[in-house]
Image (cartoon, rainbow, N blue to C red):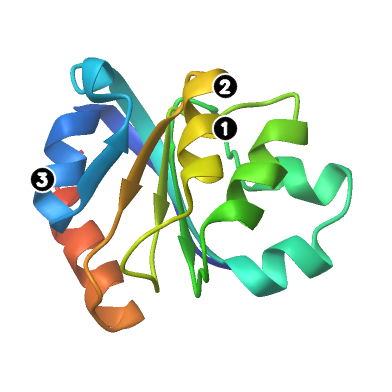
Amino acid sequence: GILEIKEYRKPLKAGEFIEGIGARVLSGENMLEHHLFGHTVLDSIKAIIALKGEQFYRIFGKSSERALIFTKVGIGRSPMVAIRISPLKPRLVVVHGTSSVEPLAVEMARVENVMLAIAPQIDIQDLINRIREVTRDV
């Protein structure tokens, strides 16, 4: 499930993270100045199927004020359902693997006060490389 996890030494603005990876904001445009303190890249299919209870909390690392990047996303609903039922909420959810998400996913992000962005349709390793570049100095 977890492809990469990193804690930052200093905070990074959500807007800088989103811009740096070439993502597009779908919900939470008013939170671009909020800080991230880490990120986790997940294979969404493996994570949603395999992670149970306490294991799910590991994806949050040391802080829930982080970006969760879900790869292999279809319509964007399942990552947001997982966030909706979790007591911990990330600052930012980025979906990868689709060109659009269904309106319900955007609405769930809004209700949960979580930023939602869609990553460019590039190879997973290329996306991870962009994330590493953006977070290299933090």
Q: Is residue 77 left or right of residue 98?
A: right
Residue corresponding to mark 1 = 108
Residue corresponding to mark 3 = 19
Element on which disc 2 rests: helix
Which is more toward the observer, 92 or 109? Answer: 109
Q: Is residue 83 left or right of residue 75?
A: right
What residue is rendered at 24% in x and 58% in y?
131
**Where 137 falls versus 96 (above or below)?**
above
**Where 35 falls versus 3 (above or below)?**
above
Q: Nearer the viewer, mark 3 or mark 1?
A: 1
Q: Earlier in the sequence, mark 3 or mark 2?
A: 3
Q: CA distance from mark 2 to mark 1?
A: 6 Å
Within 10 Å of the Cα at label 2, are there few (<14), some (14-19), or many (20+) other Cα atoms? some
Q: Earlier in the sequence, mark 3 or mark 1?
A: 3
Look at the numbered discs 3 and 1 and tell me whether their residues touch, using CB distance below 8 Å. no
Q: CA distance from mark 3 to mark 1?
A: 23 Å
Q: How many marks?
A: 3
The residue lying furthest to the front in this view is 103
Q: Which amino acid type is shown beneath numbered disc 2?
A: Glu
Residue corresponding to mark 2 = 112
- Percent of width and height locating residue 27: 34, 31
Element on which disc 1 rests: helix
Q: In terms of image quadrants, where is residue 8?
A: top left
What residue is rendered at 60% in x and 66% in y?
44
Q: Is residue 127 left or right of residue 20?
A: right
Q: Nearer the viewer, mark 3 or mark 2?
A: 2
Element on which disc 3 rests: helix
**Quadrant in which the N terminus appears:** bottom right
Q: In terms of image quadrants, where is residue 127?
A: bottom left
Q: Which amino acid type is shown beneath numbered disc 3?
A: Glu
